[in-house]
């Protein structure tokens, strides 16, 4: 379908083309100077001591879990409302994903519900900073310390997001940021692991580079795989990160316009931003009455939207583990009510106005 208002459009152009041209001309297509520059820019932005590029966010989570020693028979705690990659990366280590319900106002993991799921098999907690705002990291870190657990932050959607002034992904033992095509800055596919722990950094380097610290040598002290990024992707990332402030400003303006135009529509609510977090609009998320019918109505009017994450405890791929459906009222409610409206950089005022007018039309609001 040719949408009048698409769900996503990456903000790429002449800067990315110029960098890609440089890569082609210097013929350094694997890890090279753009990878080095991209890592340095990410470290400057986040304040992380160490950083390793990875080929995508899902494999980055898997690599982080392996670096933390997660193995078959272990258990890893994560929110029930998140993209499936968080759970599948756990399952691929042989560990059991243990889902926890979420706050109703932000859809981030509710730390008050974590301790009841901790057993002698629990090794790691994965807080996910969903939809551009931070989870409550103080409470999560206190629980991890109390039970001697590791913390792997899934900040896939968290670039530019801070918890009390600390960039997401730098508070736990390891953090992961994704650069998939729908993220605030993108390399198409790609991600980065962050840590302030030198020992973990060394483990990550060995695991991501086929069991050796540096490429070009043929002695492999440990087992590893290839999780590397290319200079082609990093070239795009370098251009993107230099645009970040501009992207954030425009996406915030788009989000605020939605809020202004939908004021007075009682059937629609926007999420709250907790006091410990800033907000980088990943989507313009709303809680909507009769969300499924609204989505279909918007589709009929060539507006592409997206539902909120389907609760992980209901996903068919985890049916080997039995979860208590009654334990996840908020993640089920988030899916039932949640709708993600487009908020990308090139979205126009006219397009946002059109979306809001169609929402008002659906609810018969004048």
Image: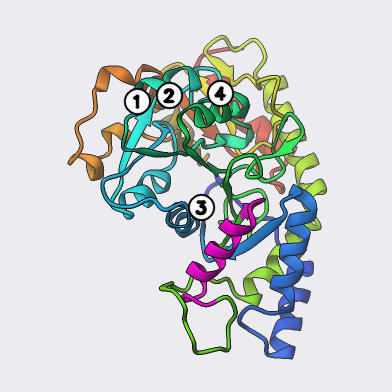
Instruction: Give how far across and how far down residue 158 sits, in percent.
Output: 63, 42
Mark 3 and mark 1 lie on one chain; the one further toward the N terminus is 3
Mark 4 and mark 1 lie on one chain; the one further toward the N terminus is 4
Mark 2 and mark 3 lie on one chain; the one further toward the N terminus is 3
Mark 3 and mark 4 lie on one chain; the one further toward the N terminus is 3
Q: Secondary structure at mark 3?
A: loop
Q: Residues within 10 Å of mark 2 (few under 14, many from 20)?
A: many
Q: Residue at x 30, y 47 (%)?
A: 95
Residue under label 1: 117
Estimate the spatial distance between the alpha carbons at disc 2 and disc 3, rounded to whole Å.
Answer: 44 Å
Estimate the spatial distance between the alpha carbons at disc 1 and disc 2, rounded to whole Å.
Answer: 6 Å
Residue 73, visible in the rendered structure = yes
Q: Residue at x 67, y 86 (%)?
A: 28
Estimate the spatial distance between the alpha carbons at disc 4 and disc 1, rounded to whole Å.
Answer: 21 Å
Q: Which residues are magenta?
A: 194-212
Residue under label 4: 106
Estimate the spatial distance between the alpha carbons at disc 3 and disc 4, rounded to whole Å.
Answer: 32 Å
Say if mark 1 contacts mark 2, CB within 8 Å: yes
Residue under label 3: 2
Compared across the picture, whether 31 is left or right of 102 comes to right
Q: Residues within 10 Å of mark 4 (few under 14, many from 20)?
A: many
Q: How many marks?
A: 4
Q: Which mark is residue 20?
A: none
Q: Nearer the viewer, mark 3 or mark 1?
A: 1
Residue under label 2: 114
Q: Secondary structure at mark 2?
A: loop
């Amino acid at each position: 379908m040719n949408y009048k208002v698409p769900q996503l459009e990456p903000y790429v152009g002449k800067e990315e083309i110029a960098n890609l041209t440089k890569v082609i001309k210097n013929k350094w297509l694997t890890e090279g100077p753009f990878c080095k520059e991209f890592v340095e820019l990410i470290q400057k932005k986040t304040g992380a001591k160490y950083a390793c590029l990875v080929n995508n966010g899902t494999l980055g989570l898997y690599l982080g879990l392996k670096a933390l020693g997660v193995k078959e028979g272990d258990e890893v705690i994560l929110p029930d409302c998140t993209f499936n990659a968080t759970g599948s990366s756990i399952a691929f280590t042989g560990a059991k994903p243990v889902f926890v319900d979420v706050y109703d106002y932000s859809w981030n993991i509710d730390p008050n519900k974590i301790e009841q799921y901790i057993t002698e098999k629990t090794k790691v907690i994965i807080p996910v900073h969903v939809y551009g705002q931070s989870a409550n990291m103080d409470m999560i870190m206190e629980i991890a310390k109390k039970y001697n657990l590791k913390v792997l932050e899934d900040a896939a959607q968290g670039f530019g997001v801070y918890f009390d002034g600390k960039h997401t992904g730098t508070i736990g033992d390891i953090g992961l940021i994704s650069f998939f095509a729908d993220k605030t800055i993108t390399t198409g596919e790609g991600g980065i692991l962050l840590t302030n722990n030198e020992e973990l950094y060394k483990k990550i380097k060995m695991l991501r580079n086929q069991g050796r610290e540096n490429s070009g040598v043929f002695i492999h002290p440990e087992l590893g795989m290839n999780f590397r990024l290319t200079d082609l992707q990093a070239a795009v990332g370098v251009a993107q990160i230099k645009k970040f402030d501009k992207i954030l400003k425009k996406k915030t303006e788009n989000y605020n316009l939605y809020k202004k135009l939908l004021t007075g529509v009682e059937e629609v609510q926007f999420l709250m931003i907790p006091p410990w977090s800033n907000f980088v609009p990943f989507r313009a998320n709303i809680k909507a009455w009769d969300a499924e019918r609204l989505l279909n109505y918007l589709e009929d009017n060539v507006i592409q939207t997206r539902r909120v994450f389907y609760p992980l405890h209901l996903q068919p791929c985890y049916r080997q583990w039995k979860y208590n459906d009654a334990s996840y009222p908020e993640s089920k409610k988030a899916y039932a009510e949640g709708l993600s409206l487009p908020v990308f950089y090139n979205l126009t005022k006219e397009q946002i106005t059109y979306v809001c007018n169609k929402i008002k039309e659906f609810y018969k609001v004048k």
